[in-house]
Amino acid sequence: MEVNLEHHGAPASSGHEETDANVAPIIWTLALLAFSTAFIGLIIYGMFNYLAKPTETPFSAGPMMTTDQTPPEPRISEHPAEELKDLNAREDQILSTYGWVNKQTGVVRVPIDRAIDLTLQHGLPVRPNAPAKENGKP
C-alpha cells in the first residue's frame, strides 16, 4: 500500500513558510499593550495618592458609638498560663484549709479530704419527707 504525502492539488512543500508574518499588526499590538499598561499604572498611582490624603472633614461619632473602648467581660487574658496557675493555687488553698463560709449562719469550710471522710462516716443527709426507694426504683 502506497501513501501519497502530497495534498490534493497543492504543490509539494519545501518544509517552511515561504511568506513572512506581517510585522505591522504585531508592533501595533505591542504598542497598544505598552500604552494601556502605562495608562492604567498612572490611573492607579493617582488613585493611591488621592486615597492616601487625609479627609478634609473631621470624624464625627455616630449615635451608636460610645467613647468607652473597654470591651465587656470576659476579656482576653494577657498572661493566661500565669492566671490559670494563680487560680489553681487559690482553689487548692480553699480546698485544703478550714475557714468560715458564713459566720452568722455557722457554715464552715473543711478540707476536701476531711469532708470525704466525714461523709463516709456519717453518710449523706436525707430529706425528712423523701419517699423510700425499693430496688433502685423511685
Image: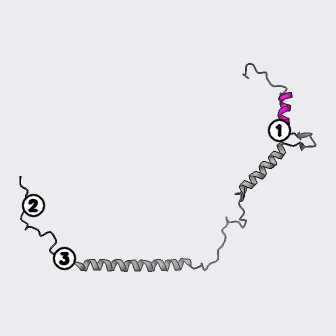
**Mark-to-mark CA distance, 2 and 1:** 101 Å
Residue 72 in the figure: left or right of residue 112? left
At x 72% / y 63%, what residue is drawn? Answer: 70
**1 or 3: tag closer to the N-terminus:** 3
Packing grade of label 2 (10 A; few <14, some 14-19, many >=20) is few
Q: Is residue 101 above or below residue 6?
A: above
Tag 3, which secondary structure?
loop
Is there a contact, CB below 8 Å, between mark 2 and mark 1?
Answer: no
In terms of secondary structure, what is the magenta stretch mainly? loop
**Mark-to-mark CA distance, 2 and 3:** 25 Å
At x 76% / y 21%, what residue is drawn? Answer: 133
**2 or 1: tag closer to the N-terminus:** 2
At x 77% / y 48%, what residue is drawn? Answer: 88
**Residue type marked 3:** Asp
Residue 39 in the figure: left or right of residue 108? left
Residue 78 location (% of width, % of height): 71, 59
Question: What number of labels is visible?
Answer: 3
The residue indicated by pointer 2 is 5
Image quarter for residue 22? Answer: bottom left
**Residue type marked 2:** Leu
Can I make out residue 19 in this image? yes
Q: Nearest the camera: 41 or 17? A: 17
Magenta run includes residue 123: yes
Image quarter for residue 116? Answer: top right
The residue indicated by pointer 3 is 20
What is the magenta range? 109-138
The residue indicated by pointer 1 is 112
Is there a contact, CB below 8 Å, between mark 2 and mark 3?
Answer: no
